[in-house]
Amino acid sequence: MKVPLLIALVATARVTLAHFSIFGVWINGQWQGDGREIYERTKFNVEGNFNPPLRNPDWPYIACGTLGHRERPKYLEVKAGDTLAPEWYWTKRGDWETTSHVGPLTVHMAPAVSTGPNTPDIWTKLFHYGYNVTDGLWADEYFQKDATTTKGHHFIKIPDVPAGNYLIRSDVIALQSANVPLGTQFYPSCVQIRVTSDGKAALPGGVSFPGSYKSDQPGIIWDFSRDDPAAYPIPGGEVWEGSLGGGIYGVNA
Ligand SMILES: *[C@@H]1O[C@H](CO)[C@@H](O)[C@H](O)[C@H]1NC(C)=O
């Protein structure tokens, strides 16, 4: 009895521990190279060193993921109107699949202030995507569905903000265990960018990590057996009217 049980547990652990983060970024269709520990802050996945989800939205790492307060050496240079597309992965590049993970995507932007990504009210929502009733797919399912060249991608347009260093925070929220408090899985991942154009549309801010996600709010609490995905309330505030938008490859681009 003991041996089969142990094998079953190990097999389960391999699946449930292999979680995802951002490998790198495309700007206007140009691959910017492996961003891990270079311009992408979140603790990355390698075999045996997985990136577990955050479950408590009051935890400081809800801003940029585990150890995401640490500045990385490089900022990717962008201008207003550029398309920035993070590419997600599990343990090696190009291996994106949702398996049992389904849920929405939120994208926020903040100035890269010296007080760090937990500074209250610095975040502004640029884009979000929940559930598409026509296709019957959640945001993260499109990452998987798309052609190889766009696999694992979503994108945003850089808004016309003042020049400076910023963070782009993408968060895939996995809802498959979200029917109980602290069952929701958050995968926040932050990319460092330097905006070289000098626009006038300053980010209004107003969103805080931690602070803006509540562990008991609808949309963080979610029960697939009861709740209607067509009415899914995406957390993290309203999309800023100054946002130039974004999308999911294959649907919006
Ligand atoms: C939902 O999917 C349909 C079919 O792919 C697409 O035409 C539509 O733009 C999608 N809606 C949104 C909001 O992306």
Image: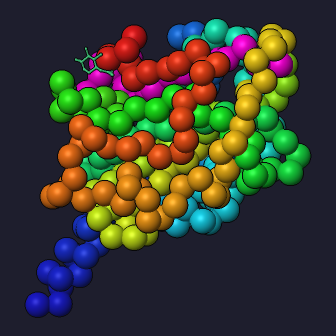
Query: Residue at horizontal 86%, vertical 51%?
Result: 115
- Asked if the stretch drawn in magenta spans residue 75, the answer is no
Helix, strand or loop for the magenta stretch, by majority = loop
Q: Is residue 219 above or below residue 229?
A: below
Which quarter of the rendered image does ligand 1 occupy? top left
Q: Please state which of residues 127 and 98 is positioned toward the viewer in this rendering.
A: 127
Residue 27 location in percent, x, y?
Answer: 60, 15
Q: Is residue 141 visible?
A: no
Query: Residue at horizontal 62%, vertical 66%?
Result: 59
Name the image quarter holding residue 192.
top right
* Picture quarter with the C terminus: top left
Name the image quarter holding residue 218.
bottom left
Task: Answer with left or right where residue 87 lies relative to residue 164.
Answer: left
Q: Is residue 220 above or below residue 204?
A: below
Q: Which residues are magenta?
A: 145-162
Residue 80 location in percent, x, y?
Answer: 70, 11
Q: How is the image coloured?
A: rainbow
Q: Please state which of residues 52 and 164 is positioned toward the viewer in this rendering.
A: 164
- Asked if the stretch drawn in magenta spans residue 156, the answer is yes
Residue 221 location in percent, x, y?
Answer: 36, 60
